[in-house]
Amino acid sequence: ASAVMLDGGGSSQCDFGGERITASRKVHNWICVWLKQGGQKPPEQEDKPMSKHTVCLDPGHGPGNVNGSPDGTYKEWEFTWDMAQRIKPLLEAQGVGVVLTKTADNYPSLTERANISNKSKPDCFVSIHTNAYGEGGWSSASGLEIYTSAGPMTAQRNVLASKLVNTFHAAGVSLRNEPIKHEMYTVLAKTDAPAALIEYGFHTNKMDTEYLKDSKYRDKLAEATAKGICEFLGVAWQAEPGEDNAEDTPDSWAAEAWGKAKDKGVLDGTRPRDNMTRQELAVVLDRLNLI
């Protein structure tokens, strides 16, 4: 709308909206200030100000990778790419920048993925995978687990893993008995930032595979992942406009099942996000005639 030019010395040369004031002394530097027109929000009132945080997401594997369920209905590389596309906008909505180690159709090496992360200098690195066990058939191994390169648990990489485990637990995701493990995987050992590799479940387990293929369950995993990362970064989670966070209202991915459980008297319809005690579990099992 207007520009004000003030020199950096002691003269009076300036221009106020076309009204020029000059002095005989020549100046060699000045300050330019542009004033915005009315109606614009000041920076501190922006809806989603960008934070100073950046996260590197690593969708594991790539097209052509054979990892998947024994029946061929699930491919790990397809899951990891889809999950990255779900997690990325959730983080960006919280003002966190996101760098990906790959595109939809390429397959960088493990070292290349680590190099991409190191060049972007993120606050943390999270690799997305699913697990396998056995000799090619179905197995009983199940649940989510997270790998870091090594201890101690006070190291930032393990603080990141712990924050993620907490948000997965709060979301009701089934975890392994020891959900945090250590392994010198290349993407964990060669990344400069605190790094964690999430195995979201076993694609060699029939029940896990059915969950992993479900879009609503993927939304649940994505939100828990984003919340865990934000917890690690110290970014307060802000609900999206219109998102219903009423105390007795379940999240969208659980709404249908919650309604059925409430209608049939299995649950009382309260505390949808709370953990269940062993005695409450016993009551639920009794109502289902399972004990």
Image (cartoon, grey):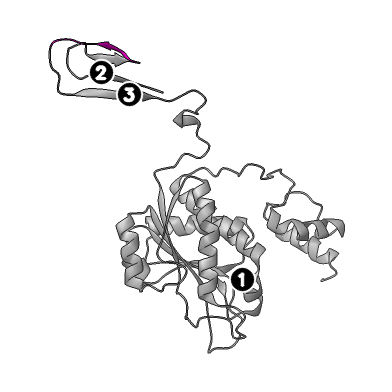
Residue 236 got which mark?
A: none
Q: Nearer the viewer, mark 1 or mark 3?
A: 3
User: Would you say the residues marked 3 and 2 are in contact, meaning their CB atoms lie under 8 Å apart?
Assistant: yes
Q: Which residue is mark 1?
A: 212
Q: Residue at x 44, y 56 (%)?
A: 160
Q: List x then y, in percent, for residue 219.
A: 61, 60
Q: Tell me the element at label 3.
A: strand
For marks 3 and 2 on the same chain, the one whose residue lies earlier in the sequence = 2
The answer to whether residue 220 is left or right of residue 118 is right
Residue 6 got which mark?
A: 2
Q: List x then y, in percent, for residue 152.
A: 37, 60
Work out which quarter of the rendered image holds the C terminus and state it: bottom right
Residue 33 got which mark?
A: 3
Q: Is residue 50 magenta?
A: no
Residue 133 seen in this snapshot: yes
53 or 161: nearer the viewer: 53
254 or 41: nearer the viewer: 41
Q: Residue furthest left?
A: 25
Q: List x then y, in percent, for residue 89.
A: 53, 53
Q: Residue type at mark 3?
A: Val
Q: Quadrant of residue 286?
A: bottom right
Q: Tell me the element at label 1.
A: helix
Q: Residue type at mark 2?
A: Leu
The answer to whether residue 111 is left or right of residue 168 is left
Residues at marks 3 and 2, CA–CA distance in whole angstroms: 9 Å
Q: Quadrant of residue 126?
A: bottom left
Residue interval drawn in magenta = 18-24
- Mark 2 is surrounded, within 10 Å at the Cα level, by few (under 14), some (14 to 19) or many (20 or more) other residues, namely some
Q: Nearer the viewer, mark 1 or mark 2?
A: 2
Q: Residue at x 62, y 57 (%)?
A: 171
Q: Residue type at mark 1?
A: Leu
